Image (cartoon, coloured by chain):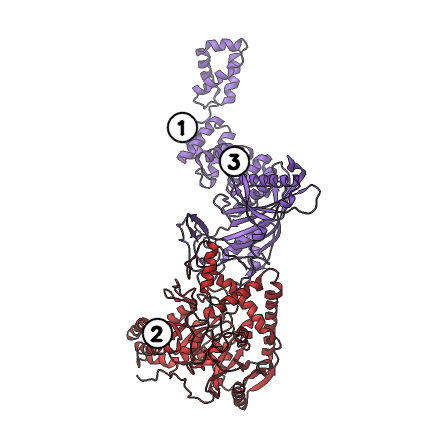
Chain colours: A purple, B red
Amino acid sequence: MSSSRYETVIGIEVHVQLNTKTKLFCSCSTEFSSSDNHNICPVCTGMPGALPVMNKKVIELASKTGLALNCKINQRSQFSRKNYFYPDSPKAYQISQYDLPICENGYLDVRLSEGAVKRIGVTRAHIEEDAGKSSHHGNYSLINFNRTCVPLLEIVSEPDMRSPSEAAEYVRALRSVVQYLGVCDGNLEEGSMRADCNVSIRPFGQKEFGTKVELKNINSFRFIEKAIAYEVSRQADLYDNGDQDQIVQETRLYDADKNKTYSMRTKEDAHDYRYFPEPDLMNLMVSDELLKELQSRLIELPFAKAERFKESFGLSEQDALLLVQQREMAEYFEEVATKSKEPKLSANWISTELMRVLKESKQDIKDFSVSAGDLAELLVLLSTKKINAKIAKTVFEEMITSSKTAGTIVEAKGLVQDDDPNSIAKFIDQVIESNPEQVEQYRSGKEKVFNFFLGQTMRLSKGKANPDLVSELLKEKLSK
Amino acid sequence: MSISLINAKASEIVEAIKSKKISALEVTEFFLKRANELNPQLNAFISIDQSCIEQAKKIDMKVSKSEPLGKLAGLPIGVKDLLCVKDQVTTAASKMLANFKSPYSSTVVERLVAEDAVILGKTNLDEFAMGSSNETSYFGVVKNPWNVEFVPGGSSGGSASAVAARMCPVAIGTDTGGSIRQPANFCGIVGIKPSYGRVSRYGVVAFASSLDQVGPMATYVEDCALVLEVISGEDKMDSTSLGLEVAEYSKESLGDKKINIALPKQYFGDALSEDVKQNLQTVIEKLRADGHKFNEVDLPLTEYAISTYYLIACSEASSNLARYDGVRYGYRSDEVSNLESLYLKSRSESFGPEVKRRLMLGTYALSSGYYDAYFEKACKLRAKLKKEFEKVFESNDVILSPVTTDTAFKIGERISDPLQMYLNDILTISTNLAGLPAMSVPIGYSKLKMPIGAQVIARSFDEKQMIAFAKLLESKKSQNGEQPDVF
């Protein structure tokens, strides 16, 4: 492939919808599912004379995110107006931050799939308001203003990514961070997180960046990779043919169905936004108290958490990364591991049994009916050999449906492992007696039949017999 | 009727209603009748609310039930048609908003109503408050009650004309570069532009957000002060309003206190007419005789104030007026074929030439490549101008100056020369740039019997001292008892 001769350079702007009850500059609800034009008022529909008033919660959420991204928090920042005409922008300007954003000069460490760690620079993060949503119907269009004035944090990266997968990993890591912080639900499909990717290529060794193209309209991680990959090969083809001049600074939209990007507007059509300081708002101040409080309450982020899980619980890289993806899952695991004192067993159970159940029932760990303490109890029964692994799985299923504890189920159903050699010996005798043919086979060297005896004995014990003991006694008796 | 409503002070009217000497209904009917009779001649109101007598009846109900009454009980007030009143048409004197019914009320109107004022109607103005003569209104020129061939000034010309003709005892105006003080001056009444941040701008159609302030206009200083008490104070809907203490301005007086009064050299230049000069000289002499001290001071940046002001005001306006796009409300052209033509035609067909001129100027000043040379430079100059005033106030209590270089001019005289029109504001705009409180107080008349006022400028948020001094100034007015032509 020709693109192997070129280095890919990617910078990403991610719009994160900050999780507030009310909008950025008015008291309307931010409820996503409300009926059209339900959450609107004079302020967010740009009525004559209406004025914006800052939602204080946004200052907290933006600063918190900035700190997590290792940014410098500007204790005095400023709003500006970005002027442009579009029907879904009711004031014909967007209130955003321009010269003085609230967060600057940070970074995010991203774990790449090969296990390496890459530090991606975060140029800035600034607060701005969302626009409304237009829909077009033949010869007329409708606008829903529910989304206007919903608070966004635009996080701008340095052009530090070098491949489509690095780009996707960066956005994934960023999503994990904002979800951990609880500042955003991180839903790409529903648009509460949106990524615009600036993509350029250059021959290896060239210092100057190539002309960048902005890709918009990408609403899944898979599409981030695919859209960039397509764009890179489109640009590489132009380079190969000596047509690199035809790479122009423009905005291109990604069409997922055709897996293609197409031009939306070129630089010549670009707006002159005529930014100027927003006179209706005072400077945005982050107080010393708030900053100190946020710093003291900084939570452990996924990257650090995975490191700690590896170190103190002896987890594998793969298990650790899997468990830290979602904050609630990581916390669930940690509780199970601590209470059961069996971290590896906990990691195995959660990453296989529990995650399977969640996936099958399309549930989130937040709504899962079995508490971490209850799962720990089950795992203790298993690790102390009170029950065996097979019984443990059945008990787990029952815990989910009945919301009873493992101990109660095991006791009520008499599922405690049978460790009594005498009662197990009786089962074995029964099996040997009723299967003379197989005994003959085994004794003549066909050792595979052993599993048949094992299965028959377990069945007679209704699964309760200690499998190790069964195996031991079987070998003893069959060799006689 | 036990009081002469036509010349009564607001406080006297309210007191008469409270003590049942007169009913709120009688008061409202008196001014409503006068407004209806005089409006065809003066065009001071864009809309008169004939149902305002219902508001008056409610006040009378309160009186009869001995319920507590507000500070403005039963006082009819005209409100500049730039302030939104819920469910009423708010036009900003533009074709663009000629049919716009506001879904909400401005904070100022809510505060007036909370103190039991009666909103008589919406007064005329220059389109979107852009003008100094009230000739740019889509609803026609307003006439000066002292001589109907003359302009009332602008942009709050409707409010000034209405008060001067006593169609209402008090009116509300807005002042971005002199829009309260200049028409008050031309119409022989009192007008206060409060400190920036003193009065909420919520619900006031924005012209230039960093300069706009709402203020009262009335026959007497005390009436203006009373209304200012009501409308002042922090509003959680306006982030630029400040939570500073609001005094009982109507009770302020200097008493025996002698003060230092600054006379800026640049405000008494050659451009001043003989009439204005003489009238000011007369009051200065009277005040000096009372023992007040006058100091000549220097405000050298005054010469840059006009260009600074027009760059900032037009830049902000170009953004503030962008929302009038024909999409959600307001005028929409009939001949629209696509989105671009919707914008172009709706705006082109409904904004007047002065509004278009300022929007283009502002758009240009903010454009990439010009921002640093124009808008940013203007902001820097503005900061310096503010410092210049601060220095004057280190050793002076107030500034006294003319409001305009001359009395009201004739209708049509300057409308074709925008620059000449802009120069009208030279003595008033600096205080908007500096955010200072300033007011216009009548002090006399020209040989042609046109009113002349003086401007009082005070320290930031020192409305107390400004009003106290204005009361003294008011008492020095010569030729008391002059009446406008229409009386």
Depth check: A284 or A256 in front?
Answer: A256
Neighbourhood count class around disc 3 (C-alpha, 10 Å): few under 14, some 14–19, many 20 upward = many
- Of tags 1 and 2, the one toward the viewer is 2
Residue A295 lies, with reference to residue B280, above or below; the image says above
On the image, the x and y values in percent for residue B211 come to 52, 69
- Residue at the far right: name it: A205
Q: Disc 2: which chain?
A: B
At a point 59% along the width and 65% down the height, the residue shown is: B375
Relative to residue B32, is residue A240 drawn left or right? right
Depth check: A391 or B413 in front?
Answer: B413
Relative to residue A376, is residue B88 drawn left or right? left
Which residue is tagged 1?
A413
- Of tags 2 and 3, the one toward the viewer is 2
SS type, badge 3: helix
Residue A225 lies, with reference to residue B230, above or below; the image says above
Examine the image and state in which quarter residue A287 appears: bottom right
On the image, the x and y values in percent for residue A75 come to 58, 59
Q: Disc 1: which chain?
A: A
Q: Disc 3: which chain?
A: A
Can residue A88 be spotted in the picture?
Answer: no
Examine the image and state in which quarter residue B35 appears: bottom left
At a point 41% along the width and 27% down the height, the residue shown is: A414
Residue B384 lies, with reference to residue A447, above or below; the image says below
Which residue is tagged 2?
B69
Which residue is tagged 3?
A340
Depth check: B10 or B401 in front?
Answer: B401
CB under 8 Å between callouts 2 and 3?
Answer: no
Neighbourhood count class around disc 2 (C-alpha, 10 Å): few under 14, some 14–19, many 20 upward = some
On the image, the x and y values in percent for residue B200 come to 46, 68
